[in-house]
Image: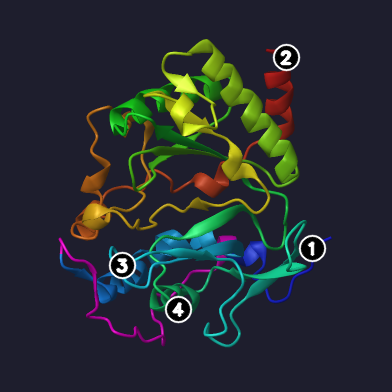
Amino acid sequence: MATGSKTISSKNAKTKKPSIASTAQVRNPDKIFWPDEGYTKGNLADFYREVFPLLQPFVANRILTLERCPDGMKGSCFYQKEKPDSMPAGTPTKRISNSSGARKSTNYVVGGQLETQIAMVNLGCIPVHVTGSRASNFPKPDWICFDLDPGSGKFSDAANAGLMVKEALDALDLESFPKTSGSRGLHIFVPIRVGPSSDDVLVFAEMLVARLAAEHPKELTVEHAIADRGNRVYLDPFRNGAVQTVVTPYSVRRKPQASFSMPLAWDQVKPSLDPTTFNLGNFRERLKRKDPWSNFFESRQNFAAASKRLNKL
């Protein structure tokens, strides 16, 4: 059984109103992270400070994996699960036993504080990767995630596939929430009440996407090998694994134009949508609009009932 150290309670994750003030200083704020656009490390930090009231509910008390890109679009990136020693004193963590590898356990960073977010920017973390369960409930998630990756590289294909996934979820009486991945794909989240294990949720997601791919073999696939997918959209259920992660809403991506993952209403999911139009250059204007995910965590649903309906189909 995994054990934890400092965490933030689920109750606080829902009710605590975050302040956008932070004592954390950004090191080398003028360092260019996106050479073509001229965006800096400081611009990235400013983005996360301003969107943190919207981001915080999706990172509060949630286990993080760090993707560190110290030179932005230049150079290379690497993933880090163990909390770096340079993180601020008192950074919340969660220790989780490892099933394999030389390290017996990993001390993961737990999100929810602006101080933590800015410290991650200082380490070169551009996106925010979170697990489906909160540290205090691990490994029991509070959402189901579907990651739609178009083999064609066209968002239009991901949008069309997303509407197929929505139809299948509607048939199970599940309300779903789409967002751009921040890259070429689409993510679909289904908020659920805490209870089922990550294994239960993963099995459910695998079953659903396998059925969809069988019904639409020309458009959709669950083939693991990229070479076998062709131009079809890959329906990835594996973001639902216990320590697997997905980028949050409002997560910036290490992509040209510095696009970020934008929550959408379903009527916005159209083949004509260009996901790169949500970026560091225009985010303030974009965020003036109504938040289509404002009731996300108030929309948690009964997973067991949906699972029974799926098994009966």
Question: Nearer the viewer's eye, disc 2 or disc 3?
Answer: 3
Secondary structure category for the residue under label 2: helix
**Taking 3 as reference, is 274 left or right?**
left
- In the depicted view, which residue is nearer to us: 312 or 305? 312
Q: Earlier in the sequence, mark 4 or mark 2?
A: 4
Q: Where does label 3 land, which residue?
A: 72
Would you place residue 36 above or below residue 183 in this image?
Answer: below
The residue pinned by badge 1 equals: 2
Residue 155: x percent and y percent?
30, 33
Task: First in sequence, mark 2 or 3: give its number.
Answer: 3
Q: Which residue is mark 2?
A: 312
Q: Quadrant of residue 288?
A: bottom left
Q: Based on the picture, tell me whether residue 21 belongs to the magenta stretch.
A: yes
Q: Is residue 34 shown in magenta?
A: yes
Which quadrant of the figure contains the C terminus?
Answer: top right
Of badges 2 and 1, the one in the foreground is 1
Residue sticking out furthest to the right = 1
Q: Is residue 109 visible?
A: yes
Give the image quarter of residue 161. top left
Range shown magenta: 14-37
In the figure, is residue 173 to the left or right of 140? left
The residue where tag 4 is placed is 119
Q: Does residue 172 appear in the picture of this structure?
A: no
Identity, as a three-letter code, of the amino acid under mark 3: Gly
